[in-house]
Amino acid sequence: MFKPPFLICTLFLMMSLAGISSARSLSILARPASPELVEVEPGEIFTMSFRVTNSADTREELTETLRMPEGWRVVMPMFEFYLEPGSQTTRLVVVQTARTAPAGTHEIAYTVTSLRDYTLTDTATVGAVLPDVYNLSLVVEGSAPEQVIAGEPFEFNVRLSNEGNSELPVRVKAELPAEGRVIVNPDSFHLGPGKSRIIKVTARADPAAYKLQRQHVHLQAAADKEKDGRPLSARLSVPVDIVPLVAGEDMYYRYPVEVTGYLGGDDEGRSLQLGIQGSGHLDEARKRRLDFVLQGPDQQDKGALGKRDEYRAHYHEPLFSVSAGDRSYALSELTSWYRYGRGLGVDVHPPDRLFGAGIYYVKDRWSYQKRSDTAGYISFSPQPWADLRLNLMTLHQESWKTMPSSRDHIASLQGKFNFRRDDNLEVEVGCSKKDRGRTGRGTAWRSVYRGKAFNDVHYSFFGRRAGPDFAGRYNDTAHYSGTVAFPISKEIRGSISCSRYDSNLDKRPERGAASRENFYSGGFRIKMPKRWTMNMDYHFYDRRDAQPIPTLEFQEHGLRAGLGRSAGPLSYRGQVRRVQTNDRLAGEIHRGWNYDFFTTYMPARTLFFTFNGSFGDNNPPADSRLLRRGRNLGGSVRWHPASNFSAYLNYSRYDQKDIDQPHRERVESDYYRAGLEYRLPNNHRVGFDIWRSEENQGNSRTSCFLKYTIPLSLPLGRKKSVGSLTGRVYRSDEPGNPGVEGAVIYVDGTATRTDGSGRFTFETLRPGEYSLKLDERTIGLDWVPVDPSSTKVTVAGAVTAESSIALTKAATLSGRLIVVPGNEGAENNRVTKNSVVGLGEKYVNSDAAPNDNGLGNILVEISRLGDIRRTVTNNEGFFLFEQLQQGEWAFKVYDHNLPEQHDLEEAAGTISVRPGEKNQTIFRVLPRVRKIRFIDEGVVEAVPPSGNKP
């Protein structure tokens, strides 16, 4: 077990053993060329610009990637591009936000990387601020049953979705007409942006209702917000819903592994590559995680789609984590930030502890002058909102050709502070020491502050300065920027932004131009009806060389206007920019236009189109920041018609003429990229990608990539927190006890169906006692369980319980309730169990009995082992009980509606039922025997009529 004191001592020991030397600054540099904080709406298309500089001495082929929040889309396809030594270019990035993107500030990271050497890479970030959007929807989850019995409970599910981008406290209520009752669970909760939740509704219809047709459960979900000036709510009226059939999850915890074969190549050849990778947890508690990649041999020289060979692993658990192999290792932004190479690293981060520590070693793989880093840190968190780190690093560069070896020491102190929910401050100061003949010491600092004030004012401030002799990630540059976005009215928002970038801070002649760049912008944004948005911005850019004899000095003024709409399946945006450039050294003024349009179309959830284009002046100055050269056109298609198939197609066309080299031929290039992936029935996946570039000068390249992936799921152990239940539904009174296919078994709210042999399985049940409920409609009316009490079962953790249900032929009991006339002799009309003799026999046959002898509306009850069934005789006195188990059934006939002066001959008793029998019986209602009493006392005399006197 690694202890923090041991790691600290080891860290300082390694620092002391390392020597001293110099480091190269970034050879590939990326930085925002547009405001670093933008305000956008959910679903909106917006643009960003990044300035990419190649300070290396080799021509590099670069690839671009974007790290965005989930659900955001790239509108304009991104392709690989070449950048000459010492040159720079502005790259346009077009993104569409997700319609349910949460409110707040989201980070978009633009990364540019050399395909030859992964070490040559840099990342620039832009913050996108989204306002609060509120919307709720209620839909039925599943389908409604055909019939609900009055007075009996029923259940259904609905799904409440938060289609906005802010968390909402929600209250749900429901009602049923007349005397119905409804309970919703849960009835109060918080719902995250873009999230949904199943709500269980338990209801009981009015017992006095005749039928439930035209009666609906009315539901309302409300939140303490307003939308369009009205309280935010969602309403739904539904009859009922059913619980989906689910048999549980896998009873084992497994580790997913994928084995992939790659066949890639270009116009010059093909090569085969094999890869094995795994990513997942190693325990049921999901506390220990392992990620690894084994991929080789190297295929990078086989076209733009070729992959490097990589071998890496990362293990993580709550106390510590270990990284090894080919990956990016990071210390801090000033020292070394995600340096790619082959190495080993250990981090110790005890939970709920104040201190943490880490150390790593990494060495370049493909650079000409090999570099190796030994680095470590110690962290201290005195408060939950504060985190401090001491970073130490030694980097060593081997000698190569005329370049001598070197060794540098770098140290920095870093702090992160979350003052409030929306205010974050990060500060880092660093110093370095060299031993290569110059002063050998350098300093650097960096600060980032982002936050929100008055609930609606967003701001972002950034500053970084690295001295001329600083040996860390940045060298001899300074970059400052700030952006503030604020409300002007309810529908109008404004923003101001400024930035400054300096290089060659001490104006050293051997380092060339001392560039000083200033950028200022301001504008407003209007939200219009029907989801239209409009923006207007002013930009000012000033760049000059601070050397005594300047090599450049020019200014740019620009106006940009944009109009867009995002509603329904179609979103589009267009913008126009007018720029004036003043080259003061050359005494030239250039005026130009740029036009851009971007469109996305999603006619269905399975199909997504993008279309974009830019055109305008083709001859702006090479150093222009506000105007882009050339014209381009492009688009993409994403098709996902089924869960096991997806395809895409990207296309871009670039048309550019280099006015700095007038004799150079105009360059027209087309880029294509397409691919598809298909998942086979056995879950194997086949993928194919092809990339092609064509130029009017005759240069063309093609790169293809075929891969076949075999997913594996390695069982690591049985889950101890849950058990499983398996069993069989079978017919016990048939030879061989055949199984019943398609029988539905319910356990604790979940259900499953039996297979062809009658077997069923519930894979993940919490330990406890359960009752199996058989849906008798799925086994047919002629079958019933032999013993209903056998459906009780106890489930234990990590154990598979067994419980089967035996079926037998169902019996029936039918009969009639008759009124026996007073002159019928009782001695000739006895009723025996399971048979009828004498007078009763003719009354069982409805054709032989007169209608006025049957007695209707009489309640008849039978019961057995807790199973109580009741029915009421019809107008002719008939009743019927079906699907009866074998055994003794107790019967009872209620006398509430008997005729006056009549009694039941036998009001209660038992009846023996055998499998498959159709039993018949009658119950007789007899008139009571009335006795007449004679009184011998009294006098009888005549009374004259009224009014007559004797």
Image: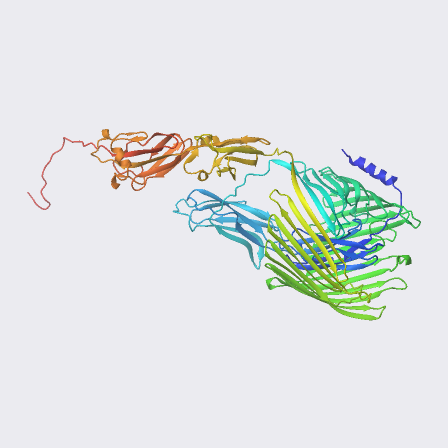
Q: Is residue 825 left or right of residue 252?
A: left
Q: How is the image coloured?
A: rainbow
Residue 455 visible, this orientation: no
> How many numbered marks have been drawn onto this rendered protein structure?
0
Q: Is residue 90 left or right of residue 104?
A: right
Residue 324: x and y, percent? 77, 40
Residue 11: x and y, percent? 82, 39
Q: Is residue 847 left or right of residue 335?
A: left
Residue 149 falls in which quadrant of the image?
Answer: top left
The residue located at (77%, 34%) in the rendering is 2
Q: Residue furthest right?
A: 437
Figure check: 106 above or below 737: below
Residue 841: x and y, percent? 27, 33
Front residue (pair 150, 765): 765
Front residue (pair 306, 758): 306
Q: Residue furthest left?
A: 950
Residue 921: x and y, percent? 31, 33
Placement of the C terminus among the 4 image quadrants: top left
Placement of the N terminus among the 4 image quadrants: top right
Residue 449 visible, this orientation: yes
Front residue (pair 935, 48): 48
Front residue (pair 843, 783): 783
